[in-house]
Image: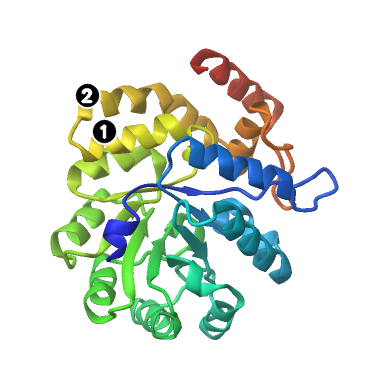
């Protein structure tokens, strides 16, 4: 079965909860996983940027992956984030995780060293050849400094059999449409941007890997299901219900926004690891006001 069938609809880029002493809060993580599954999200994505992976140690990442797998207990698929700007190290890191129980690997494009399109192609080709599970490209130029062009995405999709999809967060809808028009039939395309997931579904994408679904799992996943069933009237109602919430989630940085929401929902402590800090007082108050209106 292709990733397009396994990972349709809504995946959640899950946060990493911390205690006040900055240790990983596994009780809160377990409660959050239950909350997401009970509210009908389709799958979970662990160890992405929303999980503050730049501040996690190698041992912490391995333990989070193991805990998450055990807690999910085969109820929904799990995608693990394994990426970086050192190709050799990314390939080495693939062996750190129980790949037999993971559905796919989400791998961000190389950041900071700004490779050419040929360098990006060779980077992903090497990872795909080494991975025991399908690789999902992650294009987020706002964070990495380099865009994966539509041409490079399509070349990887057609030439590398173990590259099964892309999380597109370029904000470039025209680029997304070129990918959708020319991709293989079974190649998964999901939005990495909550704001534009709905209009991109109208263009033909398969779903979303969402930050907002951490705190609005039922409404957000219902919105995506309605849209993929061509019920854009009901989908649009939910989009506009949540739109101010989307704005607040990304008003300062991610995951400070989503952690503020989850804190006010009494699911986690409002703790981040430096260099990230909690939302400013004014924006946090706006989060509280929004929740009081929509709850």
* Residue depicted at 58% across the width and 73% down the height: 97
Task: Find residue 226 and name its label.
Answer: 1
What quarter of the picture does the N terminus occupy?
Answer: bottom left
Task: Find residue 103 and name its label.
Answer: none
In the image, residue 7 above or below residue 226 = below
In the image, residue 251 above or below residue 21 = above
* Residue depicted at 19% across the width and 49% down the height: 204
In the image, residue 265 above or below residue 172 = above
Mark 1 and mark 2 lie on one chain; the one further toward the N terminus is: 1
Report the number of numbered marks: 2
Q: Residue furthest right?
A: 21
State the image coordinates of residue 135 (x, y, percent, origin top left). Answer: 39, 71
Q: Is residue 211 left or right of residue 47?
A: left
Colour theme: rainbow
Tell which of 144 and 79 is nearer to you.
79
Q: CA distance from mark 1 to mark 2?
A: 8 Å
Dot 2 lies on which element? helix
Q: Which residue is mark 2?
A: 233
Dot 1 lies on which element? helix
In the image, residue 211 above or below residue 286 = below
Tell which of 151 and 192 is nearer to you.
192
State the image coordinates of residue 102 (x, y, percent, origin top left). Answer: 48, 66
Residue 262 occupies which quadrant of the picture? top right
Q: Is residue 229 left or right of residue 23?
A: left
State the image coordinates of residue 95 (x, y, percent, origin top left). Answer: 57, 80
- Residue 245 visible, this angle: yes
* Residue depicted at 46% across the width and 25% down the height: 244
């Amino acid at each position: 079965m292709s990733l397009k069938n396994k990972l349709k609809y809504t995946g959640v880029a899950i946060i990493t909860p911390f205690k006040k002493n900055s240790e990983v809060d596994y009780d809160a993580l377990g409660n959050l996983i239950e909350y997401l599954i009970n509210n009908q999200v389709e799958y979970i994505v662990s160890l992405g940027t929303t999980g503050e992976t730049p501040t996690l140690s190698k041992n912490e990442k391995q333990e989070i992956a193991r805990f998450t797998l055990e807690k999910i207990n085969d109820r929904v698929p799990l995608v693990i984030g394994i990426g970086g700007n050192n190709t050799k190290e990314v390939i080495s890191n693939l062996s750190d995780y129980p790949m037999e129980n993971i559905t796919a690997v989400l791998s961000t494009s190389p950041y900071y060293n700004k490779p050419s399109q040929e360098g990006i192609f060779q980077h992903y080709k090497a990872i795909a050849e080494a991975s025991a599970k399908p690789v999902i490209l992650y294009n987020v130029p706002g964070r990495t400094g380099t865009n994966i062009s539509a041409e490079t995405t399509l070349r990887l999709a057609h030439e590398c059999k173990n590259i099964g999809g892309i999380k597109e967060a370029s904000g470039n809808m025209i680029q997304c449409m070129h990918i959708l028009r020319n991709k293989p039939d079974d190649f998964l395309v999901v939005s990495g941007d909550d704001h534009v997931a709905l209009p991109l579904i109208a263009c033909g994408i398969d779903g979303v890997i969402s930050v907002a679904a951490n705190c609005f799992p039922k409404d957000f996943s219902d919105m995506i299901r309605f849209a993929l069933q061509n019920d854009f009237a009901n989908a649009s109602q939910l989009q506009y219900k949540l739109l101010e919430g989307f704005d607040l989630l990304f008003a300062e940085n991610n995951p400070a926004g989503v952690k503020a929401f989850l804190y006010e929902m009494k699911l986690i402590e409002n703790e981040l690891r430096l260099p990230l800090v909690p939302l400013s007082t004014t924006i946090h108050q706006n989060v509280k006001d929004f929740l009081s209106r929509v709850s």
